Image (tube, rainbow, N blue to C red):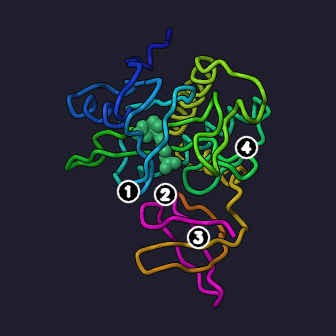
């Protein structure tokens, strides 16, 4: 790839591109280091889930080193989700965002994002932004879909990767200058969770609520049936849309 921001590493098969990128980040790899694999033996999702990674999907992780406090790392999920949404919309795919990190098409999962942060005493030392997109082949799981399934034609993964990286680079540089607000405005527009009835599964069991808004740190504002409002954090809950 001819782009001075990215420094590309490729392997046909890895355990997890996020694990590989974290190793590189801990040994000092600079911002823009990008690792890509054709398949993952142990792809990981949010909240300890596995990410099914057959050949045909796109799996990559990008090292970023923004000067932000660790608690703002979820902003990088908003940023990446918004960039994926823009790129896939441009390709006329019927995608929307499901809070916090899912790209869905007609209710089925098309892509997911896993941001993992490494912190130092003075703030975030690195963030690894991991992205999985079901591109070619049948849906890897029930409740998932792939671009090939939606369009009924096989896709060029290299072009999709290039589009996504171009959008992430532009979005990230804008984020460093302007902050999260412009991204957040787009994220809210694309987010199908907002205004919907949801079930929140947290450490204290499950609760019904209505999703109201997404905050600047990526948290979700919900309203419970008694009218009380509260913020829920992505690392603490999972969500089902009712
Ligand atoms: C989720 O939806 O829970 C997040 C899924 C993130 C999957 C990607 S695939 C590339 C990178 N490497 C991993 O092990 N996970 C992320």
Residue bearing the label numbered 2: 217
* Residue stretch in magenta: 217-242
- Which dot, 4 or 2, sits closer to the camera? 4
Tags 4 and 3 touching, CB below 8 Å = no
Tell me the number on the disc at residue 95: 4
- Compare marks 1 and 3 and give the one earlier in the sequence: 1
Element type where label 2 sits in the image: loop
- Compare marks 4 and 2 and give the one earlier in the sequence: 4
Could you tell me how far apart the alpha carbons at marks 4 and 2 are, in whole angstroms?
23 Å
- The quarter holding residue 229 reads bottom right
Tags 1 and 2 touching, CB below 8 Å = yes
Q: Please give the name of the residue rendered at 26% of the width and 47% of the height, measured from the top-left corner.
A: 119
Q: Residue 180: give x, y in percent of width and height.
A: 54, 48
Q: Residue 214: give x, y in percent of width and height.
A: 60, 61
Label 4 packing within 10 angstroms: few (<14), some (14-19), many (20+): many
- Which dot, 4 or 1, sits closer to the camera? 4
Could you tell me how far apart the alpha carbons at marks 1 and 2 are, in whole angstroms?
7 Å
Element type where label 3 sits in the image: strand
Residue bearing the label numbered 3: 221
Q: Give the vertical position of 224 relative to 85 (above or below).
A: below
Residue 5 as seen in the image, left or right of residue 161 = left
Could you tell me how far apart the alpha carbons at marks 3 and 2 are, in whole angstroms?
11 Å
Q: Residue 196: give x, y in percent of width and height.
A: 72, 68
Could you tell me how far apart the alpha carbons at marks 4 and 1 are, in whole angstroms?
28 Å
Tell me the number on the disc at residue 198: none
Q: Please give the name of the residue rendered at 72% of the width and 53% of the height, measured from the top-left corner.
A: 107
How many circles with numbers are drawn on the protein? 4
Residue bearing the label numbered 1: 71
Element type where label 4 sits in the image: strand
Label 1 packing within 10 angstroms: few (<14), some (14-19), many (20+): few
């Amino acid at each position: 790839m001819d782009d001075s921001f990215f420094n590309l590493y490729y392997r046909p098969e890895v355990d997890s591109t996020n694990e590989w990128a974290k190793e590189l980040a801990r040994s000092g790899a600079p911002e823009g280091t990008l690792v890509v694999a054709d398949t993952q033996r142990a792809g990981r999702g949010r909240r300890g889930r596995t990410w099914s990674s057959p050949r045909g999907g796109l799996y990559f992780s990008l090292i970023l080193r923004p000067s932000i406090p660790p608690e703002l790392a979820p902003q990088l999920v908003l940023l990446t989700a918004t960039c994926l949404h823009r790129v896939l919309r441009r390709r006329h795919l019927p995608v929307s965002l499901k809070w916090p990190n899912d790209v869905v098409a007609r209710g089925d999962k098309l892509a997911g994002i896993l941001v993992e942060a490494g912190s130092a005493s003075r703030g975030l030392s690195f963030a690894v932004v991991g992205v999985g997109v079901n591109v070619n082949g049948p849906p890897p799981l029930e409740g998932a879909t792939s671009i090939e399934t939606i369009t009924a034609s096989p896709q060029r993964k290299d072009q999709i990767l290039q589009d996504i990286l171009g959008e992430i680079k532009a979005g990230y540089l804008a984020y460093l200058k302007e902050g999260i607000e412009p991204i957040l405005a787009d994220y809210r527009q694309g987010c199908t969770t907002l205004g919907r009835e949801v079930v929140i599964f947290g450490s204290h069991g499950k609760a019904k609520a209505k999703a109201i808004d997404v905050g600047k740190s990526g948290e979700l504002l919900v309203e419970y049936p008694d009218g009380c409002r509260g913020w829920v954090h992505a690392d603490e809950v999972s969500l089902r849309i009712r």
